[in-house]
Amino acid sequence: MKIKRIYAENYKTYKLLDLNLEVSDDRPIILIGGGNGCGKTTLFDAIYHALYGLDIRDTKHFEELFNAGVKNAEGLENKKIVLTIEFSGMVLINKMQYSLTRTYMILDNRVVFNVVMNFGATPYKYGSGTPAKERAFNEEQINKIIAANLPAELSDYFLFDAMKTSELVKEEQINKLIEKNINSVMGFNKYSQMRKCAEDLLSEKKAARMKNEEVRKEYEELVAEKSALEAEINSLDSEYSKALNFDNDFKEQYDKAKKGHNADEVTKDKMSQLEQSISNTLRAEKEYRNDLDIVARELETKVVYAKLANIIRPEVELMMQTRAASEASKVNLLSAEQIETLTRKLVKIIETKYGNTSNFDIELLAEELKYQQDLDNPAEDKFSYLTNEELETLNLLVKTSSVNHFLSLADARERINVEISEIPQKKEQLADFRKALSGTDYNIIELYENNAQKAANLKDEIAQKRADHQKLVKKIATYDYDIPQVPDPQYDMLCKLPDFFKALSSKLLRAKKTSIERMMRDQLNINLIAYAGFIGKVELSAEDSEDISFKIYHKNGNEIYLSQLNAGAKQTVMQVLLKVLYNLGDYEPPVMIDTVMGVLDKESRDVIIESYFPDLAHQTILLSTDTEITTEHDFEKIEAYVSKVFTLHRDKENQCTDITEDYFGLKLSEY
């Protein structure tokens, strides 16, 4: 298959796209340049959807696919999206020229379509208004022609984004890729299908030959269980493939989201710290105002009383000292009561010894004695007019600690003023941080990680189901004893067919396997710069086409683990694998590669340009930026193999892509 022309009208960024993509045998490359956002991927999509069709869900989806510039200027009434691809291809042994056009438009508020395949005199065509029987027939014929040249399920291997290929280098995905290519690209599916048909026919024949009705019923139930289990395994395997494809398709988006999520988390943490700082400042200011209000209300007790206490402190201390000295001097003195009691006792003693004491006035005598005692006491209490309780109250007043709250409040005010002055700057920082947030929908992180878990679960479930299937196969085989050994050529042939097709498939696999291993080794020794010349062998371990593992070994014997290769090396491994499978497969489609250099370094780029692209396929379409295949150095290395060059230019005002016949201004040399 070779693409001759691609035409697109009103499709995404293209108002009108019309490219002649024919190549000569000695110049198999079409080089298409363009900056980011100029329409390279849309051109890629145009070719894919011209072949396999657009699935337009509704009028809104139609508007999303329709060129915005035309829609704004002219509206959608009577407007169409048109995709046409012209190609040459083989059907059986005949080479034919085909033109396939798909047209979509809105009619009566619904999307209608029309498909026409021209080749020879009689075209195949169908559309929204075609009768069901005619539509089914013509659609089937068109799909057969496309499948004969490039089946849709294989298109990912020949129309691909090189950046994504490096993500395929995971054990499960690369093994799936090889398995799928061996079974589909290399045409082994038909043998598996024939083997399955032979097994089903053999099971029916075995059941018919069983005499014991009960045994036959058990056998048929086991066969039905086996068929159901096989269908379940196929369904799980399909889900597993989808999960791996999801992993591949969204790996880059997941990594970016994860990186952005981590960066956003740091930013959000900084924002939280700023917000907390602003909140703390505002709370501190509020607390300051409350403290100031309390101090104002308690000014008398907190300030005036403290000042008064400070003034009278010396005098109170003198009072306390005087009272203490007075009290100390009275330690051995008698109180008035004690003197009176003692006087009465003395008068009584005198009365007993000397007789008449009527002339003694006891109270007067007691007062005289007390007076004499006080007269002899040297400590005089000048503050005797104050009771002990009153004096203790004064002492408590002057001893109470006094803090000048105005000083601490003044310090707080100064600090808060500085912090408040910084709030506008902090709010600006917050605004900057909010702008720095990526705004990415981080649902992809959860979806991707859930899908990874799903893939792991499916892998385990498939392994368990296959083990159950083997047990069933062995159990079913034990029912052969109940079959009468009567000669039956048809039955005998059916017994041999499943093993025959399995052996044939294995034999072809071994032959292909050896070729793949040898070609992979040779190509990696040229293209894989990190190990160029040192690849000892490539090994495909496989008992059958459903159990394949892929390994690379150094000449010294150690395994070179795929997981340890950098992104550029992984991309090279995958591109080499795809080239080998392309060369050994049953199809000869064009190869179209977006982001051709991906993450390759300069040395790897040189090798890929000089040794990989020139003989990759009989038609290779490369979509590149000027930083991948550069105008300064790379263009001249590849020019000798290029039939046509184009550059895509983005017209921002009219929202469309224009095309010039050059590569970023460089023309092809005359040849």
Image (cartoon, grey):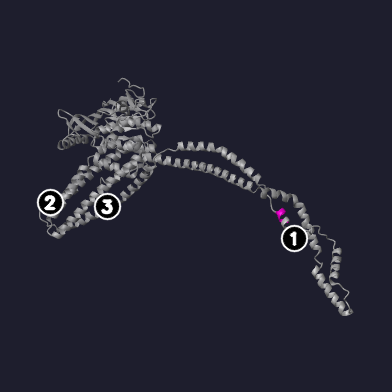
Q: In this view, does 38 lie to the left or right of 195?
A: right
Q: Say whether residue 170 is visible.
A: yes
Q: Mark 1 points at which residue?
A: 388
C-alpha span from label 1 to label 3: 102 Å
Q: Which amino acid does label 2 sit on?
A: Tyr
What residue is pinned by disc 3? 465
Give the magenta range: 395-399
Rendered position, 335 above or below 549: below
Q: Nearer the viewer, residue 220 or 123?
A: 123
Q: What residue type is labelled 1?
A: Asn
Which quadrant of the view contains residue 330? bottom right
In primary-sequence order, the first of circles 1 and 2 is 1
Q: Quadrant of the N terminus?
A: top left
Q: Nearer the viewer, mark 1 or mark 3?
A: 1
Residue 152 location (% of width, % of height): 25, 37
Q: What element carries label 1?
A: helix
Q: Is mark 3 on a helix, strand or loop?
A: helix
Q: Is 403 left, or right, of 385 in this rendering?
A: left
Pointer 2: what residue? 491
Q: Quadrant of residue 50?
A: top left
- Helix, strand or loop at mark 2: helix
